[in-house]
Image (cartoon, rainbow, N blue to C red):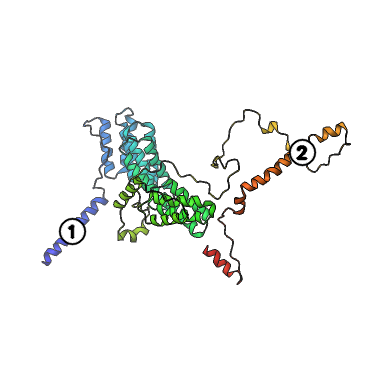
Amino acid sequence: MLCRTQWGVRLLFCVVAVSFLTTSCGIRRKKYDNPISKDTQQPDKVLFDSAIKDLERGRYEVSRLTLQTLMNTYDTSEFLAKAKLAYADSWFREGGAHGLAQAEAEYKDFILFYPTLEESAEAQEKVCMIHYRQMEKPDRDMMHALRAEEECRNLLQQFPNSKFAPNAQQLLRDIQEVLAEGEFRRGTFYHTKGSNPAAANRLQSLADHYPLFSRADEANWLLGDSYSKMGPRFRQKAGAAYARIVREYPLSELADEAKKKLQAMELPIPEADPVAYNRMKYELENHDKPGMSSHALGMFKRGPDVRAAAKSGSPALTPLRPSIPASVPLPADAAGAGFSGEVTGAQVTGPSALDTQPDARQSRQGAVTPEPAAGTAAGTATNAPAAAPAAADVTGQAAAPQAEAASGSEQKEPLPTNRQAPPQKGKKHKKANKAVQTQ
């Protein structure tokens, strides 16, 4: 019995050793995805097959030299597009920062030269995967995540009917899950700190742009709480955040609490959207629960965890743009039209205010004008223009009370700010500091 056990252990050890040696020495082949199935002995086909064999065995430099020979010698070959794609694939398989950068450049050249081929969609997907594999966690640099989102969005826009489009759509959901998680953490930080306008600005952009985010219900809950702490002026915005939880996330644990908030605020409670209900039910049924090893080894993993990403729904096809916080006062002429904060320029064709209005630099403030004799013609002519400013003053005085009445509530209630008063030292101010921290 003991001899059989020892023989089994030796056999297992030999199998592991042989598999390790074959993998490390490059004997194990990784099959290429786009071979040429045409059975011919043409010189360019022979060169291509030789390069693919080297590519599958991990001899990337030799494979690239063979492919360069094919492309330079047979520039009119029917396998030229396949050779250029295989050349980019060799860099992609080699990996590393340098290899992936070279692969991206080669894939972009392939799409530029062969935009109508089906392989162009595959090349665009590989460009997306290049940045997808280099994504960092949500609390780190988001450069590769933003680039991956852009490249996957380009694939869906340029090749919407390609067979690679469904996979790119799921990749885009995973990428936007990471971007939304980073935005959610920043909004939560401002909310915990007490900077309610900053928290509301971050969470409002998140809730509007990434509705498929796995924690979108929590983002709307914190958004409503931030608006509630900013004063009664933002009561409607707070109610809209709570109403979105009830309407778009009916299976959330915060749905009942949101209904209570709306009832306390005396706002209408909306009905649950059936489409959102079915989508959320599907997400809960197909949710990937992390195991015990993932919690222990998660800190050692470089890439983000995207298992909580949505499995259905249409991802956002536009980049996230920063918005103007709700606490920023809008100009009086753009308050009704909806000020967007964008500055535009246009060529002046007709007369402008510089041509029609008097030059303000020629007016001397404080200069005393001698008064002519009363009853003279000069006095009448001199005093006539002075009546217009007087009328303007009277009009301004008459319009001032109306403006104050229209904006009386805004003047009584100041806009909220992110800055908080520093705590004052001394025993006298101890209770006041505790009250500020509680708020």
Three-letter amino acid code at the position of disc 2: Ser
Observer-nearest residue: 254 or 21? 254
- N-terminal-most mark, 1 or 2: 1
| Left or right: 255, with 359 as reference point | left
**Label 1 sits on residue:** 12
Three-letter amino acid code at the position of disc 1: Leu
Residues marked 1 and 2 touching at CB (< 8 Å) = no
Percent position (x, y) of residue 384?
80, 34
Q: How many numbered callouts?
A: 2
- Residue that protrudes farthest toward the left in the picture: 1
Observer-nearest residue: 360 or 57? 360
| Left or right: 100, with 425 as reference point | left
Residue neighbourhood size for the residue with mark 1, other residues' Cα within 10 Å, grouped as few (<14), some (14–19), many (≥20)? few
Observer-nearest residue: 404 or 91? 404
The disc placed on residue 363 is 2
**Residue 136 shows in this picture:** no
Q: Of the residues tagged 1 and 2, which is closer to the observer? A: 2
- Residue that protrudes farthest toward the bottom in the picture: 427
**Residue 44 shows in this picture:** yes
Task: Determine the secondary structure under disc 2.
Answer: loop
Residue neighbourhood size for the residue with mark 2, other residues' Cα within 10 Å, grouped as few (<14), some (14–19), many (≥20)? few
Q: Real-space Cα distance between discs 1 and 2?
A: 100 Å
Please tell me which residue is depicted at 39% across the width and 40% down the height of the picture: 153
Task: Determine the secondary structure under disc 1.
Answer: helix
**Which quadrant holds residue 301?**
bottom left
Please tell me which residue is depicted at 75% across the width and 38% down the height of the picture: 389
The disc placed on residue 67 is none
Please tell me which residue is depicted at 64% across the width and 45% down the height of the picture: 403
Percent position (x, y) of residue 400?
68, 45
